[in-house]
Image: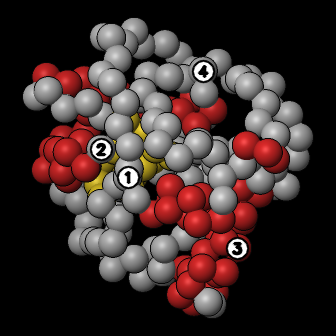
Amino acid sequence: MKTRTSRTLVTVAAAVALTLCACGTAPAPPTPQRTVPVEPLRIGDAATDTVGGWLPAGVTLSPFDVSNPIVGWLDPSLLTAIQDAADAAAADRIDMRITSGWRTPGFQQRLFDMGVQRYGSVEAAREFVAAPEVSKHVTGEAVDIAPVEADMWLIRNGSRFGLCQIFANEIWHFELAVVDGRCPPLRPNAAG
């Protein structure tokens, strides 16, 4: 994994936009081989690491790219569900990509702070970005999907894999949430 310096960090607007939209696509990868994530050495203090979980604007990952902590450090059940869904989507000619997955608490705090700056208050920011202590990305229990065609496919088919869209204002954000074969009602946003 390459070390990213502060010179390569995205601007405030681009970082927030990356978390708020499923944008960018990449060419379809060759048929992936499933591998078991290997727990890499964690460098630095996760609570203060402001880049752990960051991807440059327009970059997406395969659900099978477990060498990247964004994918490899997802909860194993979520990772399996996303990989199974990606296989099924590929059969329907849909290329499912990950725009965000696991994040350090420090990076999530940075995103939240940028949201406060952008939206003008903690209350407004909470509608779009969760604080680190409640973010499912920090625990590896949430994944953001792209492109929009994959989001729509997963909204229609995700419950077969236990995957549900959680927030009405985020069609790209999915978690394992199926109860009795059904997804729960959508919450209006991350605050509600």
Q: Which residue is mark 4?
A: 67
The answer to whether marks 2 and 1 mark residues whose Cβ atoms lie closer than 8 Å is yes
Question: Is 76 placed above or below 49 here?
Answer: above
Classify 10 Å Cα crowding around label 1: few (below 14), some (14-19), many (20 and above).
many
Q: Indicate the secondary structure of the residue bearing disc 4.
A: loop
Question: Is 79 placed above or below 122 here?
Answer: above
Q: Nearer the viewer, mark 3 or mark 4?
A: 3
- Which mark is first along the chain, 1 or 4? 1
Q: Position of residue 59 (x, y in %)?
A: 49, 37
- Which mark is first along the chain, 2 or 4? 4
Q: Which residue is mark 2?
A: 147
Q: Indicate the secondary structure of the residue bearing disc 3.
A: helix
Q: Indicate the secondary structure of the residue bearing disc 1.
A: loop
Q: Which residue is mark 3?
A: 113
- Which mark is first along the chain, 4 or 3? 4
Q: Position of residue 158 (x, y in %)?
A: 22, 45
CA gap, disc 2 and disc 3: 26 Å
Res. 165 in view: yes
Residue type at mark 3 is Asp
Residue 12, numbered label: none
Q: Which residue is mark 1?
A: 22
Q: Position of residue 137 (x, y in %)?
A: 56, 53
Residue type at mark 2 is Pro
Res. 81 in view: no
Classify 10 Å Cα crowding around label 4: few (below 14), some (14-19), many (20 and above).
some
Residue type at mark 4 is Ser
The front one of 151 and 161 is 151
CA gap, disc 2 and disc 1: 6 Å
